[in-house]
């Protein structure tokens, strides 16, 4: 009968002296940012893994209690920093639900386009670095070039290429123009070729497949029980997608598929992410051709919205409202209520629990970060894998430390 | 019969308070009935997905009577039904039963609540600090903890050029 | 020896200048990337911006092979001992770039956990502002650092020995002390 070391892991007897402990991180290239793992190894086999996190805990939620609903958008930006705009959209989705604001159709479509661009951006970096960690440098460079194009698009819209702080309560900071629409169109046109090229580079690449197929298996039941959402859950066959289940923004009008796989391993996650990018491009195509005309911000009659600049300069009402929203000791009334609102971020269910106390600041601004829940799964799925698989599994889980620790 | 009605008829003595705000359906449950209620929801009503555990410190909240509110967001993945369950605990010894035996996702979420608010979860297998350092003594998201801390962030030795 | 006898392919310089020239043009960065700035650091190194044009593309993740630490992103109280340890592991001569607002001053994160500027605890040679800085800006920073190394570097690194103070502000400023005292008073009054 083969000797199973995992049985011994529970004992602290001298027999297991041949097991040795490896500290992995917090500063290690494959952890991408600041994760730390204490691995117990038997030769190259991982017997046990204990994650230590908090190496980037910077008090986001405490800050959220001291900044108002518009100011805090600059902070949520820095949470999942490979798709910053999606955090903003999620945050203001929750705030608008609390305040009961219904967006204009143009803003809904605009935010949908940006959200899907962010999904592409997130998946580009994730699949790119996943390949990079396993030795495929080319895919990373190809995909990073596409990310630069998306940076250009959001820079045209908002003026900043990275942390855009673009959304506002009830709308966005500035409307987009036709040049922006053309930029999005040309990005979509060029993206398909690069996507296909990387498909050819990786999907049937023997070296890549050997490293990811059958690695890091997660069953559908475990996914649900452990709170896993997003592409990870869909790669295990859980058909949950908040864009379909609880439609927000313009998703109810759009025609798109929920991508899922039964594989449950790193390869399935890679395939799901690759295919989701194609679906996102389809969504953007539908939106960009049907983007409605009209105002992008909701009517300034609701007291929570920053008025348009012409009305600030030309009318006393606009000026007063601008003053009310902008001054730190003024602000708009909010309901004394609590709300949980979630969106489907590129990583999974990104929820916010906001407690309003009547002031324009949230009394409590809790984030439900998908990375945090996903990283808790890691010790279970890495067990009995090789040390080199740690890198593959970490790459496929897409853990963003700033979102993990906040 | 809606889920709220089912819960009311199952726990008539508990005094559940059901309400709705926007699309959030909420049930407020006393702390002693929390564990049976969660077990019933998981076992019989098919709420198999625990999305979120978090807490709120109501120290400075106008009109609040209890110190901490703990919030559970549970989802039925078959029907897509979402329910927010809330309970209250108080100083000096805030303790709640752990939901780890029902949903494994409660593991880290409860550890975070413990780390940030000091609410203990009895029955949790490994209740340690998770985000702040082990030697940290305060609970940073409590309202009586200042935003800028009490100087912990600068309590380190300095390395000069001559040392390195 | 008359200068006219020297062939064209030989030039004369000081040893200090030759060493500094070589060091400045072959910086090996240690990317201490903790947060968002790390992604911009990646962007700087990849296709469009291509850090290799300035001889600084050899990112090494082992501190013992590097001579330039780029602190990219906020450093929090749990991470600071790690940062100091990695800094001490790097061999001399070494330089440090503090990239981004958070590493320079704490940036928007004036909270209990974030160190308000890494220069309080390790020596920093160059600050690159921005949140995050654009890749162009990081490159400008690296060029400025090359300039600094070329004009003032010595062969045996004696210029570092003179710096006995941390190069940033003093670790405890008055504001901080007042804030701590107020916080303690608040605590006492609560109890």
Image (cartoon, helix red, strand yellow):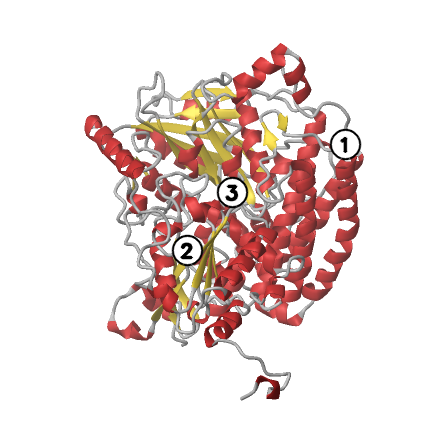
**How much space separates mark 1 and mark 3, taking CA atoms?**
28 Å
As displayed, is residue A306 above or below residue A38? above
In the image: residue B86, left or right of residue A207: left
Q: Are marks 2 and 3 in contact (CB under 8 Å)?
A: no
Say whether mark 3 and mark 2 are on the same chain.
Answer: no
Whole-percent x and y of residue B110? 37, 41
Instruction: Name the residue that disc number 3 marks.
Output: A78
Q: Secondary structure at mark 3?
A: loop
Q: Are marks 1 and 3 in contact (CB under 8 Å)?
A: no
Q: Nearer the viewer, residue A10 or B67?
A: B67
Q: Chain of mark 3?
A: A
Q: Nearer the viewer, residue A377 or B154?
A: B154
Q: Chain of mark 2?
A: C
As displayed, is residue A118 above or below residue C64? above
Whole-percent x and y of residue A79? 50, 43
Nearer mark to the viewer, of 2 and 1? 2
**How much space separates mark 2 and mark 3, taking CA atoms?**
24 Å
As displayed, is residue C145 above or below residue A249? below
Q: Which mark is residue C124?
A: 2
């Amino acid at each position: 009968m083969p000797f199973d070391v995992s049985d011994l892991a529970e004992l602290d007897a001298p027999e297991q002296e041949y097991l040795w402990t490896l500290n992995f991180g917090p500063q290690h290239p494959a952890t991408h940012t600041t994760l730390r793992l204490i691995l117990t190894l038997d030769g190259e086999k991982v017997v046990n893994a204990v994650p230590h996190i908090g190496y980037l805990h910077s008090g986001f939620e405490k800050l959220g209690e001291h900044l108002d609903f518009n100011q805090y958008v600059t902070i949520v930006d820095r949470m999942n920093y490979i798709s910053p705009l999606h955090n903003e959209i999620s945050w203001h989705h929750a705030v608008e639900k609390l305040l009961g604001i219904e967006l204009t159709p143009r803003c809904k479509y605009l935010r949908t386009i940006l959200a899907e661009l962010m999904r592409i951006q997130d998946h580009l970096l994730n699949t790119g670095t996943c390949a990079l960690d396993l030795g495929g440098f080319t895919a990373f460079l190809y995909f990073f070039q596409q990310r630069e194009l998306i940076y250009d698009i959001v820079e045209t819209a908002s003026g900043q290429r990275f942390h855009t702080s673009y959304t506002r309560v009830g709308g966005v900071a500035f409307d987009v123009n036709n040049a922006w629409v053309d930029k999005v169109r040309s990005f979509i046109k060029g993206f398909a070729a690069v996507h296909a090229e990387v498909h050819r580079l990786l999907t049937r690449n023997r070296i890549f497949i050997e490293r990811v197929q059958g690695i890091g298996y997660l069953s559908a039941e475990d996914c649900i029980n452990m709170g896993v959402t997003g592409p990870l859950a869909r790669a295990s066959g859980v058909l949950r997608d908040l864009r379909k289940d609880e439609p927000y923004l313009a998703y109810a009008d759009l025609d798109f598929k929920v991508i899922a796989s039964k594989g449950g391993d790193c390869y399935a996650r890679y395939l799901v992410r690759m295919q989701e990018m194609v679906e996102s491009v389809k969504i953007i195509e539908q939106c960009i051709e049907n983007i409605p005309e009209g105002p992008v911000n909701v009517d300034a009659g609701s007291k929570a919205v920053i008025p348009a600049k012409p009305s600030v300069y030309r009318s006393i009402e606009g000026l007063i409202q601008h003053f009310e929203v902008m001054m730190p000791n003024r602000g708009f009334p909010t309901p004394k209520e609590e709300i949980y609102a979630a969106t489907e971020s590129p990583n999974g269910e990104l929820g916010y629990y906001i407690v309003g106390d009547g002031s324009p600041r949230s009394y409590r601004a809790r984030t439900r970060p998908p990375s945090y829940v996903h990283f808790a799964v890691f010790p279970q799925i890495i067990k009995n894998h090789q040390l080199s698989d740690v890198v593959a599994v970490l790459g496929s889980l897409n853990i963003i430390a700033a979102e993990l620790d906040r | 019969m809606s889920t709220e009605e089912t819960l009311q008829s199952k726990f008539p003595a508990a005094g559940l308070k059901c309400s709705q705000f926007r699309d959030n359906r909420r049930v407020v449950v006393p702390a002693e009935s929390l564990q049976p209620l969660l077990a019933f929801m998981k076992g019989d009503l098919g709420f198999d997905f625990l999305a979120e555990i978090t807490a709120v410190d109501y120290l400075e909240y106008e009109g609040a009577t209890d110190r901490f509110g703990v919030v559970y967001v549970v989802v039925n993945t078959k029907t897509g039904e979402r329910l927010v369950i809330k309970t209250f605990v108080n100083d000096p010894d805030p303790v709640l039963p752990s939901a780890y035996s029902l949903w494994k996702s409660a593991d880290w979420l409860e550890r975070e609540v413990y780390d940030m608010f000091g609410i203990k979860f009895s029955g949790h297998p490994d209740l340690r600090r998770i985000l702040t350092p082990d030697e940290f003594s305060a609970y940073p998201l409590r309202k009586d903890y200042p935003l800028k801390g009490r100087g912990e962030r600068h309590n380190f030795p300095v390395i000069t050029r001559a040392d390195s | 020896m008359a200068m006219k006898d020297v062939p064209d392919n030989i030039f004369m310089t000081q040893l200090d200048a030759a060493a500094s020239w070589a060091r400045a043009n072959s910086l090996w960065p240690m990317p201490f990337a903790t947060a968002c700035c790390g992604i911009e650091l990646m962007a700087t190194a990849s296709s469009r911006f291509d850090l290799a044009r300035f001889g600084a593309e050899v990112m090494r993740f082992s501190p013992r092979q590097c001579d330039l630490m780029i602190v990219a992103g906020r450093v929090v109280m749990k991470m600071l001992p790690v940062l100091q340890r990695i800094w001490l592991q790097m061999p001399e001569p070494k330089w440090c770039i503090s990239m981004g607002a958070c590493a320079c001053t704490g940036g928007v994160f004036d909270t209990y956990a974030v160190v308000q500027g890494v220069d309080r605890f390790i020596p920093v040679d160059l600050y690159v502002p921005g949140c995050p800085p654009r890749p162009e800006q990081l490159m400008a920073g690296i060029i400025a650092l090359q300039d600094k190394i070329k004009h003032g570097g010595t062969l045996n690194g004696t210029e570092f020995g003179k710096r006995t103070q941390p190069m940033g502000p003093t670790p405890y400023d008055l504001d901080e002390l007042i804030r701590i005292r107020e916080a303690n008073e608040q605590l006492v009054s609560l109890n």
